[in-house]
Amino acid sequence: MIKRIRCILFCLLPLIITLVLQILVSIPVCGVTVITALLKNYNHESAGSETFNDLLSLWSSSSFIIWVSMLYAIAALILFGFWYYKKLAADQELVPVKYAFNIQIISSLFLLAAGLQYVVQYLMSFIGVLRPDWMQSYADLSESAGLGSMSPLTLVYACIIAPVSEELIFRGVTLGYAKKSLSVTAAIVLQAVLFGVFHMNIIQGIYAAFLGLFLGYLFEAGGSIAVAMLFHAFFNLCGSFFSPYMYYGIDQPFFFMLWLTVGVLLTYAGIFLFQHGTAVRDMK
């Protein structure tokens, strides 16, 4: 029993390391910006206030936040990629990456990503009705992080770097250690909850935990972390381009129910096609 508790507590380590890594990356970046601002305003009469205003403006800008997020995600990708492939991949990677996909699996992941975007949008809408303050806080956070406007840098981060690094952290390392002391189902639930906590925002945390359940399932059923990475990339891609056109408010009940039904059907179709695709792949 004590050994199991110790193993479960060890599953928290990747999340703790991830949060510490964010701080370690942010400190030198902010230090460089402080030095730059001081040098820029060195000869000004009001150097102190000018420097403070420059730093406040820079640190609150979406471009700065994205750059820091990129640097952190790359550091996490290197650290957890090394950890996963040295310590855990041999037991978890049941299918080599070059054999992990076929046309059915790739198509199913895109269908599932689109369907879950609908479902998540309506889940957030329902939460927003119950707690509009949570929704407003999430909207403010998304705007400050630059997620409201899709620059090329934001797309690279959201659709490539973040999916790879987050899958290595949670479906790779966290889930790998969780399965050593828990059943597969319980391990998937645990890593999904930790994935929600990682986002440090109630709205994001709820839908990230919900999404984490599907990511854990796809990793286990797909036999390769690359499957979860590709789905995660598709999901973020759909959210970046299509989410503004995928939502109808509850004040339009017909369209609200219509597109919610579309989302559920797309999700079901994606899972069905994924299971068929993996069955065909494994027979070969």
Image: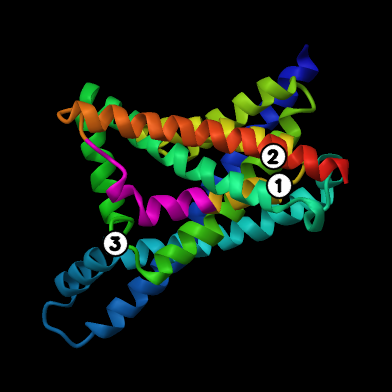
Name the residue carrying label 1.
225
- Is residue 98 found inside the magenta-colored segment of the image? no
> In terms of image quadrants, where is residue 126?
top left
* Position of residue 62 in the picture relative to residue 3 (left or right): left
- Residue drawn at the location 46% of the way across and 39% of the way down: 115
The amino acid beneath tag 2 is Phe
* Badge 2: residue crowd in 10 Å (few <14, some 14–19, many ≥20): many
- Residue drawn at the location 49% of the way across and 48% of the way down: 235
Q: Residue furthest bottom?
A: 43
Q: Position of residue 68 (x, y in %)?
A: 44, 63
What whole-number distance in Å separates the C-alpha atoms at marks 3 and 2?
Answer: 30 Å
Q: Which residues are magenta?
A: 234-248
Residue 93 seen by the camera: no
* Position of residue 261 in the picture relative to residue 182 (left or right): left
What whole-number distance in Å separates the C-alpha atoms at marks 1 and 2?
Answer: 5 Å
Q: Secondary structure at mark 3?
A: loop
* Badge 3: residue crowd in 10 Å (few <14, some 14–19, many ≥20): few
Name the residue carrying label 2.
219
Name the residue carrying label 3.
149
* Position of residue 280 in the picture relative to residue 213 (left or right): right
Q: Position of residue 236 (x, y in %)?
A: 46, 51
> In terms of image quadrants, where is residue 73?
bottom right
